[in-house]
Image (cartoon, rainbow, N blue to C red):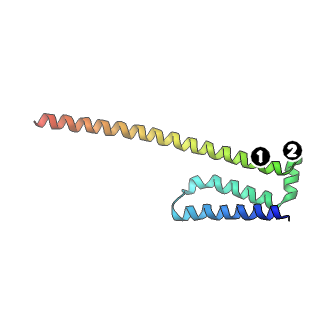
Amino acid sequence: MTLIQYIALFGSLCFLVTVFWAIHRGILSAGYALLWIVVTCGMIVLAWAPRLLNYVAMLIQVYTPPFVLVLFMLGGMILLLFQQSIIISRQTEKLKRLTEEVTLLKAEKADKNNAEK
C-alpha cells in the first residue's frame, strides 16, 4: 500500500469512529447516520483495495483511478444532500402545522377570555 492509501484509510476509519461516537452520544440519529456509514465503508473498501479501484475505473471508462474516489465521494455527497432536503421538507411541514395549531389555540383562548368579560 502507498502512503496516500494509508492516509485515506486512516481518515476514513477516523470518520467512521466519529460517526459511531456521535450516535452513541445522541448527537446523530442512527437513521440519519446510516448513509454516512455506508459512504464511509465504501471509501474504506476503495482505499484498501486499489485493484478494485482500478477495475471500477476500467468498468466506467475513467482513465485515472483516483477520479473514481472523487466520483464516489461526489455521489455520496449528493445522496446526503438529498436526504437532508427530505428531512428539511418534513420539518417545514411539521412546523407549519404546529404554527397553525398554536394560532388556533390562541384565538380560542382570546375568545374564551372575551366571553368571560
- Binning the other alpha carbons within 10 Å of mark 2 as few (below 14), some (14 to 19) or many (20 upward) gives some
Circles 1 and 2: CB atoms closer than 8 Å: yes
Vertical relation: 30 (above or below) 93 = below
Judging depth in this view, the residue of 25 and 66 nearest the camera is 66
Mark 1 or 2 closer to N-term?
2
Answer with the quarter of the image where residue 48 lies.
Answer: bottom right
Answer with the quarter of the image where residue 41 lies.
Answer: bottom right
State which quarter of the image contains the N terminus. Answer: bottom right
Relative placement, left or right, of 54 versus 102 is: right
Vertical relation: 99 (above or below) 20 = above
Q: In x, y percent, where is residue 60? A: 85, 43
SS of the residue at dot 2? loop
Relative placement, left or right, of 13 versus 46 is: left
Q: Amino acid at mark 2?
A: Val
The residue at which mark 2 appears reads as 62
Q: In x, y percent, where is residue 105? A: 28, 39
Tell me the distance, in whole angstroms, between the alpha carbons under discs 1 and 2: 10 Å
Vertical relation: 75 (above or below) 50 = above
Number of the label disc, if any, that sits on residue 71:
1
Answer with the quarter of the image where residue 87 lies.
Answer: top right
Q: Amino acid at mark 1?
A: Leu
Residue drawn 61% across and 60% down?
19
State which quarter of the image contains the C terminus. Answer: top left
Number of the label disc, if any, that sits on residue 49:
none
